[in-house]
Amino acid sequence: MSTVADKLAKKSSHKTTAKQVRLRLVYIDFWSAVKLSFLAAIAIAIVTVVAFVMVFFVVQATGTIETVDGFVGSISDGSILISEFISLPQVLAFSAIVAILNLVVVTVLGAVMAGIYNLAVKVTGGLLVGFTSN
C-alpha cells in the first residue's frame, strides 16, 4: 500500500519537457495603459496622503513645530507663528493637492510611454519575450 506522499514523489519524478515560446510585444493598447497608470497613480496618491499625515504627526509629537515657532518668534518679535500655517487641515489640503497633481502626471506619463513604445516598435520591431510552460 502506498501513501499519498509516495504517489506525489512518483508523480514529481517524471520530468516533462517544457515548451518554450518566444513572442514579440508589438503593441500596447493605449486605453489599457491609461487605465493601468491611473490605478497605479491612485495607489501612489493614497501613499502620499498617508505619508504627509504621518510626517506631520511625528513632527508634532517631537515638538519641532513649537521649537521652530519659538525661533521664528524671537526673530520676528512674535508677529509670525509657524503653527498658524502648519496644522492638520492645512497638511491634509496640501497633501490632497500634491496627490491630485501626481495622479494627473502619472496618468499622462503612462499614456505617453505607451504612445512612445508603439512608435518605437515601428522602428525596432518590438520586444522579444520568452515564455515556458511547466
Image (cartoon, helix red, strand yellow):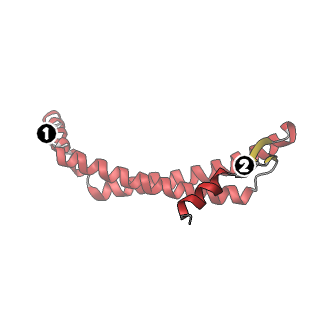
The amino acid type found where label 1 is placed reads Gly
Q: Residue at x 55, y 64 (%)?
A: 4
Quarter of the image with the N terminus is bottom right
Question: Would residue 96 appear left or right of 89 to someone viewing this image?
Answer: right
Q: Is residue 29 left or right of residue 70?
A: right
Query: Which residue is identified by label 1?
Result: 70
- Density class for disc 1 (Cα within 10 Å; few <14, some 14-19, many ≥20) is some
State the image quarter where residue 78 is shown: top left
Q: Nearer the viewer, mark 2 or mark 1?
A: 2
Residue sitting at 19 percent across and 45 percent down?
A: 81
Residue 123 or 53: which is nearer the viewer?
123
Relative to residue 43, is residue 65 depicted above or below?
above
Would residue 4 appear left or right of 121 to someone viewing this image? left
Say if residue 40 shows up in the picture.
yes
Q: Is residue 86 visible?
A: no
Whole-percent x and y of residue 37? 61, 54
Lower position in the chain sequence, tag 2 or tag 1: 1
* Crowd band around label 2 with a 10 angstrom C-alpha radius: few (<14), some (14–19), many (20+): many
Q: Dot 2: what SS?
A: helix
Question: Disc 2 designates what residue?
Answer: 114
For the view shown, which residue lies furthest in the front direction? 1
**Which one is nearer the viewer's eye here, 98 or 114?**
114
Residue positioned most to the top: 75
Q: Quadrant of residue 121?
A: top right
Q: Residue at x 60, y 61 (%)?
A: 7
- Residue 64 is situated, as x and y percent measured from the top left of the image, at 19, 41
